[in-house]
Every structure is written in C-alpha cells, then in structure tokens.
Image (cartoon, helix red, strand yellow):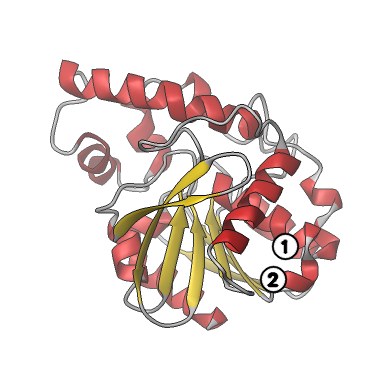
Amino acid sequence: MELKTIKTHYTPVRYFEGGRGQPLVFLHGAGGLAADDAFLAKLSESFHVYAPLIPGYGDSDECHEIRDMLDFTLHTWDVVNALGLKDPVLVGHSMGGMIAAEMAAVCPNDVSRLGLIAPAGIWLDDHPVADIFTKLPYEMPALLYHDEEVGKARLTTGLALDDPKFLQGFLVTNARQLGMAGRLLFPIPERGLSERLYRVKAKTILIWGDSDKVVSPVYAHEFKRLINGAQLVSIPEAGHMVLLEKPRETIAAIQRLA
C-alpha cells in the first residue's frame, strides 16, 4: 500500500492506496492502520482500496475542527469527494463502521454498497460496549482477539507486554489516537445512530466475529433489525479483530458487495 496525502477543507489527510478493481473506501477502527496492514494487503487483491487515516492517526496532524459525529461524517465525505470517487464500496471496522453507517444514513443516495465489520454506534444497556479507554496494555489481546496468544503477537510485534519499548510506543500512540477516537466513543458510543439507520438504502453486509468481546454479537442482530435488508455474516472463532483473525472469510463477505 502506498501512503499519500490529499487536501480537504479542514486538514490534509493521509491515506493508503493500492490494488485494482472496483474502488473501495475502508475506514479503520480506533486502533488505526499501518502500511503493512495484512488485511488491507489482502483486500487490495480484490479491490482498488483507499484507506484514509482519521486526523491524529499515523503521522497526520490532529484537527480540532472535527469535534462530533456530524463533523466526522461530513469530513469523510469530503475525503471521498477529494479522491474523486463516486459511489465506492464503503467498508468500516468498529469506529470506522460507525462512521460508514452514518455516511450511508446521511447521504443514502450516494452509498449503494455498505460493509460494516463489528461497527460501534449503538448502545444496549444490557450489553454495554467495552470501554477501551480504561484498559491496560496487558488486557487488550484477550479483549480484541479470540486467540489471546495471536493477539499478543500482533499487538507487540514480538515484544513482551511489559517491555519498556512496547509500553512507550503504545502509550504515546494511544494518547494521540484515542484522543480523536474519544470524540466518538467516550464515554459511550451513542450518538443517535440507531434513530437514523432506517435511512440507509445501501445493500448492507454485517460481519461479526462470534467471540467479539468489545461489541457483542447481540449488536449484530440489532443492526440487522434497523437496516432494511441487511445480511449478517457470523464468523466463528474470531473476536473484534475478525478482519485480522479471519481475513479470508471477512473478504469473502465483502466480495458479496462487488
């Protein structure tokens, strides 16, 4: 994937681009993206992928003008327009799924294909979404992954969870990234999305890991109920990072939108 920059109204936006085929915009979750992201590489074998970074992620500057859900939604539409894309396949994971769902609800005639991978954005009192802002590094692998050992290896790139090198990078990166993510997800990811999902006209695929401990699979059925005609693909032995644990199955589900 090649890292590029495009200018929008408020701020320059860094984005990854690669692959060939139908254009697909991928919106990342609170954990961000890297150039060597294995899921993006695999996705680019089937689509021409554009993956913009939320301001404050990677080497991009924070943008204080982007403050709330509407700002994030309109900013991301600005990115799509700046890229010169018309009706790309729109896919988002977790926080990115929340933004993608809002984009499809706000501009229902501009999104015909929508892929939501364990999206945030709805709140059920009996099944609270995990508060990632209070978690310590050693808690994250078991929270995010079905296979905790795989999660440890992916999150630390081989370092121990208590290694000072890992902790320093983790804390510095998280401070910037979660500062932006908090505008959507803290204290709870409830911004009225459930009241707008009836507006979505896109063909919608919901993708969920059966072992998701961040956004319970209970939410999959709520999204399915609220989005007319949505299809649900449940993937066994996968957690919230289903796109990394089960990339082949996740991409196969997204290919239903092609």
Q: Position of residue 250 (x, y in %)?
A: 43, 68
135 lies left or right of 204:
left
Q: Quadrant of residue 141?
A: top left
Q: Residue at x 37, y 38 (%)?
A: 58
Q: Which residue is mark 2?
A: 111
Alpha carbon separation for disc pair 1 and 2: 6 Å
Q: Secondary structure at mark 1?
A: helix
Q: Residue at x 45, y 63 (%)?
A: 50
174 lies left or right of 214:
left
Q: Secondary structure at mark 2?
A: loop
Whether residue 48 is situated above or below residue 143 in the rendered picture = below
Three-letter amino acid code at disc 1? Ala
Q: Which residue is mark 1?
A: 104
Q: Position of residue 52 (x, y in %)?
A: 47, 52
Q: Quadrant of residue 17?
A: bottom left
Q: Position of residue 67 (x, y in %)?
A: 68, 30
Q: Residue at x 37, y 45 (%)?
A: 145
Three-letter amino acid code at disc 2? Val
70 lies left or right of 6:
right
Along the polypeptide, which appears first: circle 1 or circle 2? 1
Question: Can residue 237 be seen by looking at this rendering?
Answer: no
Q: Residues within 10 Å of mark 2 (few under 14, many from 20)?
A: many
Q: Residues within 10 Å of mark 1 (few under 14, many from 20)?
A: many
Question: Can residue 31 be seen by looking at this rendering?
Answer: yes
42, 19: nearer the viewer: 19
Q: Position of residue 115 (x, y in %)?
A: 58, 66
Q: Residue at x 29, y 61 (%)?
A: 1
Q: How many marks?
A: 2
State if disc 2 and disc 1 touch (CB < 8 Å).
yes
